[in-house]
Amino acid sequence: MDQWYESLHSEGLLSDASYEKIKLHEKAGLFSVHWEIKTLLYIGVLLLTAGLGILVYKNIDTIGHQFVLAFIALLVIGSFSYCFKYALPYDRAKVKAPNTAFDYVLLLGTISFLTFTAYLQYQYQVFGSNYGLATFIPMVLLFLTAYYFDHLGVLSMAIANLALWMGVSVTPKELLHNYDFDSEHIIYTYLLLGILLLVLAFVSQKFDLKAHFKFSYQHYGLHVSFISLLAGYFHFYNSIFAMFWILGLAGLALIFYADAYRSRSFYFLLLVILYSYIALSSLAIRMVTQVENVGGLYLAFLYFLGSGGGLILLLINLNRKLKSE
């Protein structure tokens, strides 16, 4: 291409100014806006669904419930008809989207479907007081959709619905803000959810069944499991059973530290180390509080000063080691 421009310039068909502009343009290269466009498209889908919800809410008396349900149903049917028409054949391995719009149409259809089922339950109580069934059916359909169309966004929604079906919320923020961990039932439910997600992560990779789904399962599973084990430790703080929860956390940390190192994932190494540091610090403070007077306060200060610096150095060295290997 450069030689072609040079020949045009040497023949006098391209001016000096134009030739210099072309050379500068070639040196600059192309700038990718792939992720910017994808982000805008995702925001567009969310704004569309939110805007429709607000429109319906403000005009429900004049529009009517049947019209709203019919409109949402048309959105669902239209979106999934498009996806089934253009989807590539199912494969256990990763399948790319057939075109740019596919992922966003599927996301629109999925959100509309959840809105449709929630609207039916809220307005007409089609599931009665059986709220477990009201969350179980969407959960199953979301998992089937995520696997059939190979969509990580829908998979995250399916995991959230799995948590709702079990009566909890999967996000770490909600886990920490609701802090209903005084209930043993809640602690055990969270722990069961976390272990289930980690098992699904293992199955995904072991049997090569959408192996790239492992990250999502393991991401949520580790957060929920570690927080549940810490909650169990603090719940049984004054009991001999407290140490069993710490031992469980240590075992989980060792398993997934090895897995993260083997897969060269600094993110999962970071999670394991941070949650392990929290557990270790709680044990250290427990011992420090046994020291009377101000000595315990000084020891706690020295511990956090030294351990904080050591933690930073450990993470830096691990990051360098992973990159070098």
Image: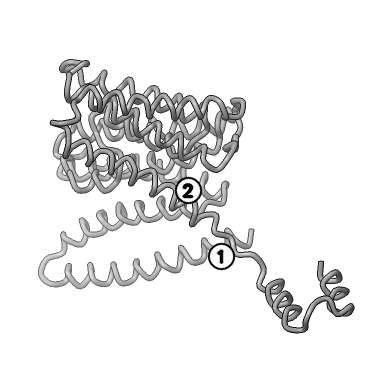
User: Which residue is pictured at 17% across the width and 18% down the height?
Assistant: 125
Picture coordinates of residue 152 (x, y %)? 47, 38
For mark 1, give the secondary structure: helix
Label drawn at residue 252: none
Are the residues at dot 1 and dot 2 in contact (C-beta closer than 8 Å)? no
User: Which residue is pictured at 16% across the width and 59% down the height?
Assistant: 290
Callout 1, which amino acid?
Arg
Alpha-carbon neighbours of circle 1 within 10 Å: few (<14), some, or many (≥20)? few
Picture coordinates of residue 123 (x, y %)? 17, 23
Image-quadrant location for residue 144:
top left
Image-quadrant location for residue 286:
bottom left
- Above or below 292: residue 125: above
Q: Name the residue under label 1.
A: 320
Q: In which quarter of the image is the N terminus?
A: bottom right
Alpha-carbon neighbours of circle 2 within 10 Å: few (<14), some, or many (≥20)? many
Picture coordinates of residue 22 (x, y %)? 72, 74
Label drawn at residue 257: 2
Residue at the front extreme of this rendering: 13
Q: Can residue 192 be seen in this view?
A: no
User: Which residue is pictured at 28% across the width and 39% down the height?
Assistant: 52
Picture coordinates of residue 174 (x, y %)? 24, 44
Callout 2, which amino acid?
Tyr
Counting residues from the N terminus, which is met first, the one under dot 1 or under dot 2? 2
The answer to whether 185 appears left or right of 148 in the picture is left
Taking depth in this image into account, of 160 and 197 the one nearest to the observer is 160
Image-quadrant location for residue 30:
bottom right
For mark 2, give the secondary structure: helix
The answer to whether 82 appears left or right of 165 in the picture is right
Q: Is residue 99 visible?
A: yes
Taking depth in this image into account, of 67 and 181 the one nearest to the observer is 67
